[in-house]
Every structure is written in structure tokens, then in C-alpha cells.
Image (tube, rainbow, N blue to C red):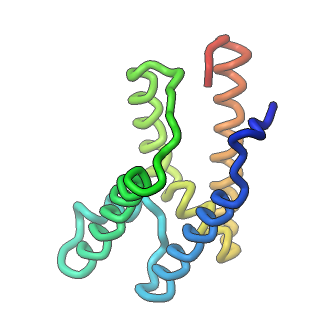
Amino acid sequence: MTIDWLHFSPWTSLLGGALIGLAAGGLMFSLGRIAGISGILAGMFSTTGNERVWRVAFVLGLLTAPVLARLTVGLPVMTFEASPTTLVVAGLLVGLGTRYGFGCTSGHGICGLSRLSARSLAATLLFMAGGFVTVYGMRHVLGGAA
């Protein structure tokens, strides 16, 4: 592995992580809710009233932030080395995994670990192991880019 020192951004990464922690903590302290994106998104379609309002606002914030960033500071050029079909299949598998794992990486990895949840620790370790195995298989067994 090599680090692209020209584009290495520890300060913006630190700021981004701090903002994620602040948002997760703010949601927990203000509404008593976990900032797990898959649960928030699923609840948008199955709840009503104030419960739906905060979920819609949270998702709109997620969608609006990159637009504002692009307008103010610009975004890096993104390239995908996978086909659209591969990206769709990967997205569906991640969605299926979040349902079987009763949460996503944000819910378990950020909120669950900070609450010292053993279930979240197990889920996060499995998420990471699954990612390692997938990248290894795609790069070294199948010979593609992952």
C-alpha cells in the first residue's frame, strides 16, 4: 500500500470525523436515537409524524452536504474501476448485509462501539473481515480491481 502524500488530507479527515461524531452525539442526546443510516433510511418509509420529520431532515442533510461542498470548495474527481453492474450488485449486497446484521457500519461502528456494545463490536469485526476478504478475492484471486 502506498500513500498519495500529495493528496493526503489529515486535517480535513479529522474535521470530517469530528463532525460525524458531533452529529451522532447530537442525535443521541437530542432524540435518543442511533445515527445508523440504514435504520434512519428504512424508518423514513415506515414511520409517521415527528419520527419521519427528523429522519427526512437527516437524509436531506446527507444529500445536501456534498452539493454545498462542491459549490464552496469543490470536490475531488472520482473514478470507479468497477462496472455499473458490479456497483449495483455490491450495493444490493451491502443493503442485504445491513438487514441481516441489524444495522450498518455507521450504526454499529460509530454509535455502537462508542456505547461499548459487544454486538456492535462483533458486527464491526465481521464488516471489516468481509471487506478484507472481498478485496483480497477481487484483487488476488479474480485479478480485478477492488
Q: Residue furthest toward the front?
A: 72
Specify the quadrant that holds the C terminus: top right
Q: Eyeballing the image, is 40 above or below 142? A: below
Left or right: 119 in relation to 67:
right
Residue 105: x, y in percent?
Answer: 56, 55
Q: Residue at x 37, y 58 (%)?
A: 68
Q: Residue furthest toward the bottom?
A: 30
Q: Eyeballing the image, is 2 above or below 129? A: above
Q: Residue furthest toward the top?
A: 143
Q: Eyeballing the image, is 12 above or below 58? A: above
Residue 95 vs residue 87, the one in the foreground: 87
Specify the quadrant that holds the N terminus: top right
Q: Which residue is drawn at 70% across and 74% down?
A: 116
Residue 71: x, y in percent?
Answer: 37, 53
Residue 110 vs residue 15, the one in the foreground: 15
Quadrant in the picture for residue 136: top right
Q: Residue at x 23, y 70 (%)?
A: 47
Residue 47 vs residue 70, the one in the foreground: 70
Q: Residue at x 43, y 60 (%)?
A: 37
Marker count (numbered): 0
Q: Residue furthest toward the left?
A: 49
Residue 133: x, y in percent?
Answer: 70, 31
Q: Eyeballing the image, is 118 above or below 10? A: below
